Image (cartoon, grey):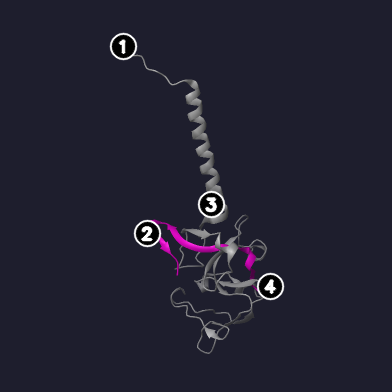
Amino acid sequence: MKHRRVRPPRRAWAARAGEVALVAVVVLVAGFLVRTFVVAPFSIPSRSMTETLQVGDRILVDRLSARFRDVRRGEIVVFDGTDTFGALDGSRSAGETDYVKRVIGVGGDRVVCCDDRGRLTVNGEPVDEEAYLYPGDKPSELRFDVRVPEGRLWVMGDHRSSSRDSRAFLGAPGGGTIPADDVIGPVLAVVWPLSRLGGVP
């Protein structure tokens, strides 16, 4: 005696398809919200932050904290340079408006390079850059003495001899500083390649 397969009613199939579609939509919306408001991936395009960040590294940026607290000295941040660095730096291709640099000075700080021992100082105190400054680089070949305006940041790459940063725009409006409001967020970690998985100093 042959057994006939019992097919679920069409309504059951339609209900299941509707559930799958709903789950897919929820996942997509959740992913969009996380990427927009919580964390976002970025890729490192240049050598300006080596050896801390390498060309091709994929990093995660914390979008959320930038909305609720001030940027801190020493943090590595990604910022939208459309109206600052991007507007003045002809070497960037169209659409490449995000930059990654280390925050050296915040609003009200006096950033000077260099003191009589060749060190970068903030508010008269030498900055210990041994943990991240590219081997063989000086804190800066270019001398400067800058008072950072309130609501703005002085940023520099860790690979000082290969970085176009605040120093390159000293003569521009803002004196090379960027608006703190342009910060997308601090870098949380390197997530790719797996051999470099981990946080940043």
Amino acid residing under circle 1: Lys
Q: Is residue 91 left or right of residue 2?
A: right
Q: Which is more N-terminal, label 2 or label 1?
A: 1
- Determine the CA span between mark 4 and mark 1: 84 Å
Q: Which is more N-terminal, label 2 or label 4?
A: 4
Residue matched to label 1: 2
Q: Which is more N-terminal, label 1 or label 4?
A: 1
Q: Label 2: state its secondary structure.
A: helix
- Give percent across and percent down for residue 65: 55, 63
Q: Residues within 10 Å of mark 4 (few under 14, many from 20)?
A: some
Amino acid residing under circle 3: Val
Residue matched to label 2: 195
Q: Residues within 10 Å of mark 1 (few under 14, many from 20)?
A: few
- Determine the CA span between mark 4 and mark 2: 39 Å
Q: Is residue 121 above or below residue 155?
A: below
- Give percent across and percent down for residue 115: 54, 87
Residue matched to label 3: 34
Q: Which residues are magenta?
A: 172-201
Q: Is residue 2 above or below residue 105?
A: above
Q: From this viewpoint, which residue is outermost toward the top?
A: 1
The residue drawn where x is 44% and y is 60% is 190
Amino acid residing under circle 4: Gly
Indicate yes or no whether the magenta region holds residue 198. Answer: yes
Whether tag 1 and tag 2 are in contact, CB under 8 A, the answer is no
- Determine the CA span between mark 3 and mark 2: 25 Å
- Give percent across and percent down for residue 122: 56, 81
User: Which of the two marks, 3 or 4, is nearer to us in this view?
Assistant: 3
- Determine the CA span between mark 1 and mark 3: 53 Å
